[in-house]
Image (spheres, rainbow, N blue to C red):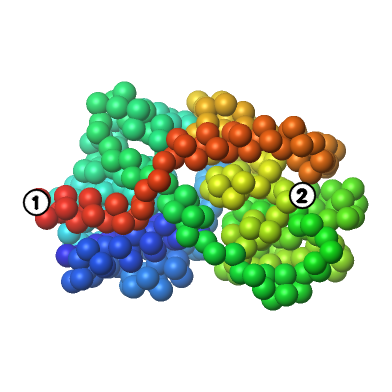
């Protein structure tokens, strides 16, 4: 069968690459083409366009680039039309992918959605649109089954791929040696995000607290698909080290973490590393988001637990003073640390134990063969 897969960011690239590997096992004759990243390419997909060309975040940034995005949509639709897949598989990335879903449905193509867009956070009415446009939805948050059930839409909960990735990870015993990190200082992990705008908004504030923690080594989890200039300006400081494309090893050896809101908050929790969640965007984007958001938290950890497990320093609360106070509690207050890790255990229980990509591929191929 022929599969067309679209992922628009780094985490989607990772999860889609694992799905591609499993689809090829379930369907040895699979022909796979799509938009995504290096990991999807390595897994065996013919890559049409890299997600780094489409990485716009925030309402204002999307508006500024609206004509570019329209051009991408037109290009993607034409490619799908020419390829004529048996199914279009969309991975998160709602603004772009829901438009593709509408087009694919109009073309009479099957539409699967792997990793639901976060419509439960805002614009919940989009569930009606998804119900009309998406033949099968595969969700990775335990609360999403109940959410879609409110719209009389049955979805498949397949576990969370982050749980699988963390469980499968074997820490590199030579991590410190490989990256020339001294053995005499405990590590504070810094995960500033994977997109240029996130890093520009977050990293300089995260690292500004270093003078209060001279006995610790700050390790920044960098991504190599961005220009090194975004990180290298911090490399002159003795207690800061930039490590590329090794976030799980960074977390494996960390004593605490500063984490930009996103998938990394859940990864950090599953590694059982005490964390403070950070987020800042443009004033306009934040003002719009504040009016639209319909959930009480921004971090996946708190959303899954349905209670405040980790502290969220958002926008005006994201200051060096607040970071220092929170980080000191995460490093030195045993009761505070234990309370957060008890919350992590609740998150693990709610997620459950699945082989997410394998389960998704089995279901997808099965549903296609039924037809």
Judge whether 304 appears above or below 362 on screen: above
Q: Nearer the viewer, residue 60 or 334?
A: 334
The residue that appears at 34% across and 49% down in the rendered structure is 114
Q: Earlier in the sequence, mark 1 or mark 2?
A: 2
Any mark on residue 344, and which?
A: none
The residue that appears at 85% across and 69% down in the rendered structure is 236
Q: Quadrant of residue 287?
A: top right
**The residue tagged with tag 2: helix, strand or loop?**
helix
Residue 56 visible to an observer of this rendering: yes
**Disc 1: which residue:** 371
Q: CA distance from mark 1 to mark 2?
A: 52 Å
Judge whether 71 appears above or below 173 on screen: above
Q: Position of residue 182 (x, y in %)?
A: 81, 68
Q: 10 Å neighbourhood of mark 1: few (<14), some, or many (≥20)?
A: few
* Count of marks, rendered view: 2
Q: Position of residue 19 (x, y in %)?
A: 34, 59
Q: Is residue 66 left or right of residue 3?
A: right
Any mark on residue 206, and which?
A: 2
Q: Is residue 236 left or right of residue 313?
A: right
Judge whether 260 appears above or below 132 on screen: below
Q: Position of residue 358 (x, y in %)?
A: 31, 56
**The residue tagged with tag 1: helix, strand or loop?**
loop
Q: Is residue 160 left or right of residue 111?
A: right
Q: Nearer the viewer, residue 234 or 54?
A: 234
Q: Position of residue 298 (x, y in %)?
A: 57, 35
């Amino acid at each position: 069968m022929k599969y067309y897969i679209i992922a628009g960011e780094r985490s989607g690239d990772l999860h889609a690459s694992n799905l591609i590997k499993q689809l090829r096992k379930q369907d040895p004759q699979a022909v796979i083409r799509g938009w995504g990243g290096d990991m999807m390419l390595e897994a065996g997909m013919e890559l049409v366009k890299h997600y780094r060309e489409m990485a716009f975040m925030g309402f204002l940034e999307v508006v500024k680039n609206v004509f570019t995005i329209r051009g991408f949509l037109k290009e993607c639709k034409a490619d799908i039309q020419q390829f004529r897949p048996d199914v279009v598989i969309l991975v998160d990335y709602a603004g772009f992918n829901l438009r593709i879903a509408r087009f694919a449905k109009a073309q009479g193509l099957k539409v699967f959605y792997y990793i639901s867009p976060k419509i439960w956070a805002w614009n919940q009415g989009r569930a009606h649109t998804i119900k009309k446009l998406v033949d099968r939805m595969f969700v990775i948050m335990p609360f999403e089954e109940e959410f879609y059930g409110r719209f009389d839409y049955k979805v498949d909960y397949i576990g969370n791929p982050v749980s699988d990735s963390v469980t499968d990870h074997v820490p590199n015993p030579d991590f410190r040696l490989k990256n020339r990190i001294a053995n005499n200082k405990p590590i504070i992990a810094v995960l500033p995000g994977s997109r240029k705008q996130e890093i520009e908004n977050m990293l300089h504030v995260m690292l500004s607290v270093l003078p209060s923690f001279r006995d610790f080594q700050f390790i920044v989890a960098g991504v190599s698909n961005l220009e090194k200039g975004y990180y290298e300006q911090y490399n002159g400081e003795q207690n800061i080290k930039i490590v590329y494309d090794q976030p799980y090893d960074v977390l494996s050896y960390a004593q605490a973490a500063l984490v930009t809101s996103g998938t990394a908050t859940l990864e950090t929790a599953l590694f059982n590393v005490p964390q403070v969640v950070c987020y800042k965007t443009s004033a306009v984007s934040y003002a719009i988001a504040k009016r639209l958001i319909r959930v009480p938290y921004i971090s996946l950890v708190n959303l899954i637990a349905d209670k405040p497990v980790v502290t969220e320093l958002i926008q005006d609360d994201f200051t060096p003073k607040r970071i220092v106070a929170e980080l000191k509690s995460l490093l030195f207050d045993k009761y505070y640390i234990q309370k957060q890790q008890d919350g992590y255990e609740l998150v693990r229980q709610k997620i459950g134990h699945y082989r997410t990509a394998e389960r998704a591929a089995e279901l997808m191929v099965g549903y296609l063969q039924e037809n």
